[in-house]
């Protein structure tokens, strides 16, 4: 079921970010290295993707009135998505961090945050100016965050954890070359390219 959710999220996301104005906003923000604009456009893409999957999502500028306490952000997470249901307090299906800082430790903090939440799908979106910077980032995240959980902690981790890295070095093939997708393998502790 989780593999199906990952595939559906990715497919829906690519359809959403190819939409006229959103595609233009993301491309322009990436080429200008305007990470504030990139985050705003990516937030809209995440919300639309969740909606396309039948999920209701909260994010900055997208207040959700599903839970008894109405918020734009829950647990200081950038995006939180919920399925329909009868329970007033339900757990999220997906949680996302949209990290626009270039600092590796800031991205590591975002990964640590989503790994600390129970959800079927955890995603960290981040940005690297050049694709050559991605292997060092993956190594840092593995060594500093994933290995801190230890094997026992990783094996108990339920759901899927994705790292989605935008890179303008391949923005000419937007969106497929621009967004690289990695899935955390809980057995090895490594992020594997999708």
Image: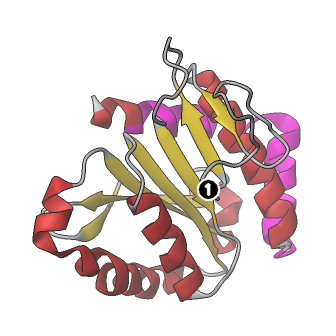
Q: Which residues are magenta?
A: 6-33
In the image, residue 165 lies at what x, y percent?
A: 55, 66
Task: Reply yes or no: does residue 70 show up in magenta.
Answer: no
Task: Reply yes or no: does residue 11 show up in magenta.
Answer: yes
- The residue singled out by tag 1 in the image is 77
- The N terminus - image quarter: top left
Residue located 37% across and 47% down the image: 118
In the image, residue 113 lies at what x, y percent?
A: 49, 65
Residue located 70% across and 49% down the image: 73
Q: Which residue of the protein is positioned furthest toward the top in this rendering? A: 86
In the image, residue 53 lies at what x, y percent?
A: 55, 23
In this rendering, is residue 32 above or below 18? below
Residue in the foreground of this view, choosing between 133 and 191: 191
Q: Please tell me how crowded label 1 is: few (under 14), some (14-19), or many (20+) other residues with Cα within 10 Å.
A: some
Q: Is residue 172 left or right of residue 120?
A: right
Q: Is residue 139 left or right of residue 74?
A: left
């Amino acid at each position: 079921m989780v593999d199906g959710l990952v595939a559906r999220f990715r497919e829906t996301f690519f359809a959403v970010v190819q939409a006229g104005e959103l595609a233009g906003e993301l491309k322009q923000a990436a080429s200008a290295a305007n990470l504030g604009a990139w985050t705003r456009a990516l937030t809209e893409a995440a919300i639309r993707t969740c909606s396309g999957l039948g999920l209701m999502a909260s994010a900055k500028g997208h207040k959700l009135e599903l839970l008894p306490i109405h918020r734009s952000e829950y647990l200081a997470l950038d995006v939180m998505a919920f399925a329909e249901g009868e329970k007033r307090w339900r757990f999220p299906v997906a949680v996302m961090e949209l990290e626009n800082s270039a600092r590796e430790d800031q991205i590591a903090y975002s990964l640590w945050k989503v790994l600390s939440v129970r959800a079927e799908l955890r995603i960290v979106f981040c940005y690297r100016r050049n694709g050559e910077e991605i292997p060092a980032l993956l190594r840092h995240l593995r060594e500093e965050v994933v290995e801190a959980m230890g094997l026992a902690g990783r094996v108990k981790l339920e759901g899927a954890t994705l790292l989605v890295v935008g890179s303008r070095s391949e923005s000419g093939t937007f969106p497929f070359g621009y967004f690289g997708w990695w899935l955390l393998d809980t057995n090895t502790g490594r992020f594997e390219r999708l």
